[in-house]
Image (cartoon, rainbow, N blue to C red):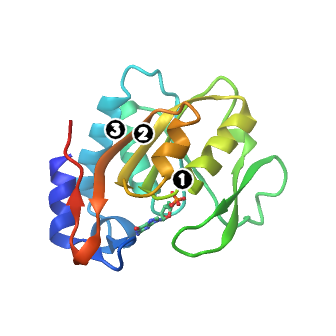
Amino acid sequence: MKALEQKILEEGKVLSESVLKVDSFLNHQIDPVLMQLIGQEFAQRFKDAGITKVLTLESSGIAPSVMTALELSVKTVFARKRKSLTLVDGLYSAEVYSFTKKESNEISVSKQYISKEDKVLVIDDFLANGQAALGLTDIVEQSGATLVGIGIVIEKGFQTGRELLEGRGIRVESLAIIDSLVDGEVTFKEEK
Ligand code: 5GP
C-alpha cells in the first residue's frame, strides 16, 4: 500500500536492525486519514470472506481495526492485556510473549463477544515473530469461531511471523512488508 510505505519513509524511525518506531501515526499519535485508507484496504482484501467480527489486541491494533470494522459494517473487539476488575468470569485467554517489551502477558477477551458462529478477521499493527497474532488465533480457536485470516499493517518480512502463521494454514495479508532496516534505512519488499 503506497500511501503507508510513503508515511513510513517520511516519519518512521529505525531504532535498530529489528525495530521500527511509528509513534507519529500508528503507535501513539494516530493519523485518522491514513487509518481510514488502511481500513478500506483490509476490507477490500477480505470482502468476500463473510467476516462478522474483527479481533485485535490493545492498544495499537484498535485504530486500524475500528476503521476496518466500519468499512465491513461489523463490530470489533480488542483483547485486553490487563484483566479488568469487571472482567472476571467468562474469559478466553492466551499467553503472549511481547517482542518489544521482552515479557509475557496474558491477553483475554470476554466470551460474550465472540461466538462459534463468528467469522473472525484478526488485525494487528506489526508482525515480527508472530506471537501476538498466534495468541489472538488461540482465542478464536477457543471460541469455536472460524478464523478468516490475519491483516497486518506493517510486517517485518525478515522475521519469522509469516512462516509460522502460514505454516498453520492461515491467510496473512500485510499492507507494507519491510525487507530490511539495516543502516538506519527502511527498504520494502516489492508489491506483487
Ligand atoms: P510478534 O508478536 O509478531 O513477535 O510482534 C508483534 C507485536 O510486537 C506487535 O503487536 C507490536 O506491538 C510489537 N512490535 C513488533 N515489532 C515491532 C516494531 O518494530 N515496532 C513497533 N512499534 N512494534 C513492534
On the image, the x and y values in percent for residue 102 come to 60, 75
**x then y, percent, for residue 113:** 66, 40
* Viewer-nearest residue: 162 or 107: 162
Where on the picture, by quarter, is residue 142?
top right
Residue 130: numbered disc: 1
Residue 179 appears in the figure: yes
Rendering coords of residue 89 (x, y %):
85, 51
Kindly report which numbered mark, 1 or 3, lies closer to the viewer in this rendering: 1
Give SS at disc 3: helix
Of residues 146 and 164, the one nearer the viewer is: 164
Which of pointers 3 and 2 indicates the residue nearer the eye? 3
Return the residue at label 3.
42
User: Nearer the observer, disc 1 or disc 2?
Assistant: 1
C-alpha distance separating marks 3 and 2: 9 Å
For residue 145, side relative to residue 1 (left or right): right
In the image, residue 35 sits, relative to residue 27, either above or below, namely above
Q: Which residue is mark 2?
A: 69
Mark 2 closeness class: few <14, some 14–19, many ≥20 residues within 10 Å: many
